[in-house]
């Protein structure tokens, strides 16, 4: 075994190890029958891997490219992946269980004889992919795109393929007969139903339908635009619905709001953000709202060598927040009794932002639940997206969010958010 391979195995065998911006060429190396726990791969590239018999527990893969690798007979348990790309890979005879792979892409990849249980592959793209003899149990492939797909002898138990594109009408009929829930994209079904209705109605009813459509769009226009924006930024998945709803056939509304921060995009300037300088900073010079650059319209937060703290606060105005920050009830966001699965995400450029998430014990007191350290970016780097999952135990009843010191010149942040996940 060469030294580089030994060093990589040592790192992989550790628990909760992060890999940021690294490239792995595993040619001539054979990693088989290994078990890895809680590893994190962010903006990484892996190629030429012979990875048979892997077991990946609670592994996170973000913004990464995996190519020409063989994962035959592997297991993916409670894994999370987003904005990823598997290319020319073999994932046959593998098991995917209790995992979220929504918002990714697969090209020239095989899942032959693989088993999928309680998995989310919504908003994915599948090109030249084979699911021959695969089994899907309680899985979600909503709003995904398929091209040259092989589903021969696939089996379905509470598997949802709603609002998908690229499947032939005959294939969708066969899938429905075999237990899958399949339908065309919303706009196709809506178009067909409108045409059929208009052909059966007279001129007066046509006018009423058009008026009702405009009235409905006018009422929900803001919610529709917000959720479409989330789809394109991969920050949420409104067209898919929680796995536990699949067997009941009763999904929630497509535009149902989840827990998120008010004014997370700074569209209301600094409302809901409590700025606490440690020294006699000129806050108006150190903390600004700028419209010259932003991740989401119309503006972003600009921080310039600020020595202090910035808390999210539930009240719109922060002038009344005059006590010790962590003793102020308005900074704490309540959780449900069983704890929460959360996703913390933000966009940034020109620096290295750091965020702390505090948890408050039900019996009193608090502790830091997560210290989020993003990768440092240079001034010429465009906006960078960062997200991280967090499981809050049930003995906490609330959380709060704090932005730490900013020693850099002119760092920018936008779309700072905490959302509940399923």
Image (cartoon, helix red, strand yellow):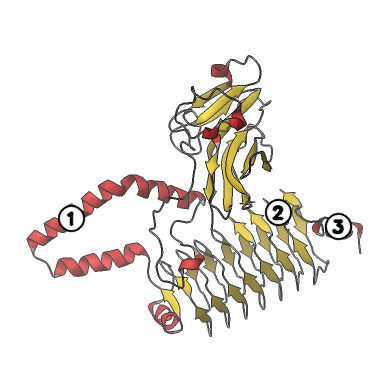
Which residue carries the number 3 mark?
Answer: 10
Horizontally, residue 54 falls left or right of residue 230, namely right
Decide: is 132 above or below 328: below
Kindly check if marks 2 and 3 are in contact, taking CB atoms under 8 A apart as contact.
Answer: no
Q: In which quarter of the image is the N terminus?
A: bottom right
Q: What element carries label 1?
A: helix
The answer to whether residue 141 of the structure is visible from this angle is: no
Q: Earlier in the sequence, mark 2 or mark 3?
A: 3
Q: Earlier in the sequence, mark 3 or mark 1?
A: 3
Decide: is 150 above or below 162: below
Residue 324 x %, y %: 61, 26
Mark sitting on residue 241: none
Horizontally, residue 3 falls left or right of residue 394, namely right
Real-space Cα separation, disc 3 to disc 1, in angstroms: 65 Å
Label 2 neighbour load within 10 Å: few <14, some 14-19, many 20+? many
Real-space Cα separation, disc 1 to disc 2, in angstroms: 51 Å
The answer to whether residue 362 of the structure is visible from this angle is: yes
Which residue carries the number 2 mark?
Answer: 40
Q: Residue furthest front?
A: 363
Label 1 neighbour load within 10 Å: few <14, some 14-19, many 20+? few
Question: In which image quadrant can residue 8 be found?
Answer: bottom right
Q: Which of marks 1 and 2 is nearer the N terminus?
A: 2
User: For this rendering, which residue is in front, 248 or 227?
Assistant: 248
Q: What element carries label 3?
A: helix
User: For this rendering, which residue is in front, 47 or 111?
Assistant: 111
User: For this rendering, which residue is in front, 57 or 409?
Assistant: 57
Q: What residue is drawn where x is 53% and y is 23%?
A: 288
Which residue carries the number 1 mark?
Answer: 210
Q: What residue is drawn where x is 53% and y is 85%?
A: 153
Residue 105 x %, y %: 56, 62
Horizontally, residue 314 falls left or right of residue 360, namely left
Residue 104 x %, y %: 56, 60
């Amino acid at each position: 075994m060469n030294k580089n391979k030994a060093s990589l195995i040592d790192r992989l065998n550790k628990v909760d190890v992060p890999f940021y911006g690294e490239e792995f060429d595993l040619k001539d190396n054979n990693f088989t029958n290994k078990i890895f726990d809680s590893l994190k791969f962010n903006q990484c590239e892996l190629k030429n891997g012979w990875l048979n018999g892997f077991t990946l527990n609670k592994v996170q893969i973000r913004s990464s490219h995996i190519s020409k690798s063989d994962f035959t007979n592997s297991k993916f348990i409670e894994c999370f992946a987003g904005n990823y790309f598997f290319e020319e890979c073999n994932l046959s005879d593998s098991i995917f269980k209790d995992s979220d792979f929504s918002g990714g892409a697969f090209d020239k990849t095989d899942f032959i004889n693989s088993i999928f249980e309680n998995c989310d592959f919504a908003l994915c793209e599948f090109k030249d992919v084979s699911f021959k003899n695969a089994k899907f149990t309680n899985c979600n492939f909503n709003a995904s795109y398929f091209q040259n797909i092989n589903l021969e002898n696939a089996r379905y138990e509470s598997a949802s393929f709603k609002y998908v594109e690229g499947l032939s009408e005959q294939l969708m009929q066969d899938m429905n007969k075999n237990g899958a829930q399949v339908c065309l994209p919303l706009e196709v079904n809506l178009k067909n139903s409108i045409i059929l209705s208009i052909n059966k109605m007279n001129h007066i009813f046509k006018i009423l339908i058009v008026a009702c459509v405009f009235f409905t769009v006018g009422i929900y226009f803001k919610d529709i635009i917000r959720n479409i924006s989330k789809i394109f930024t991969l920050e949420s998945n409104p067209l898919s619905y929680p796995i536990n709803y699949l067997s009941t056939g009763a999904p929630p509304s497509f535009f149902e709001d989840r827990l998120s921060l008010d004014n997370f995009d700074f569209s209301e300037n600094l409302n809901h953000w409590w700025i606490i300088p440690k020294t006699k900073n000129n806050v108006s010079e150190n903390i600004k709202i700028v419209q010259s650059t932003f991740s989401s319209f119309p503006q972003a937060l600009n921080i310039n060598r600020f020595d202090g703290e910035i808390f999210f606060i539930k009240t719109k105005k922060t002038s009344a927040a005059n006590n010790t920050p962590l003793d102020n009830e308005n900074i704490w966001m309540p959780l449900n009794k069983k704890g929460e699965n959360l996703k913390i995400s933000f966009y940034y450029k020109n620096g290295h932002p750091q965020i702390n998430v505090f948890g408050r014990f039900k019996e009193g007191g608090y502790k830091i639940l997560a210290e989020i350290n993003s990768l440092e970016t240079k001034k010429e780097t465009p906006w960078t997206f960062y997200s991280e999952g967090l499981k809050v135990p049930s003995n906490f009843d609330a959380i709060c969010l704090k932005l730490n010191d900013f020693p850099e010149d002119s760092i920018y942040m936008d779309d700072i958010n905490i959302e509940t996940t399923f």
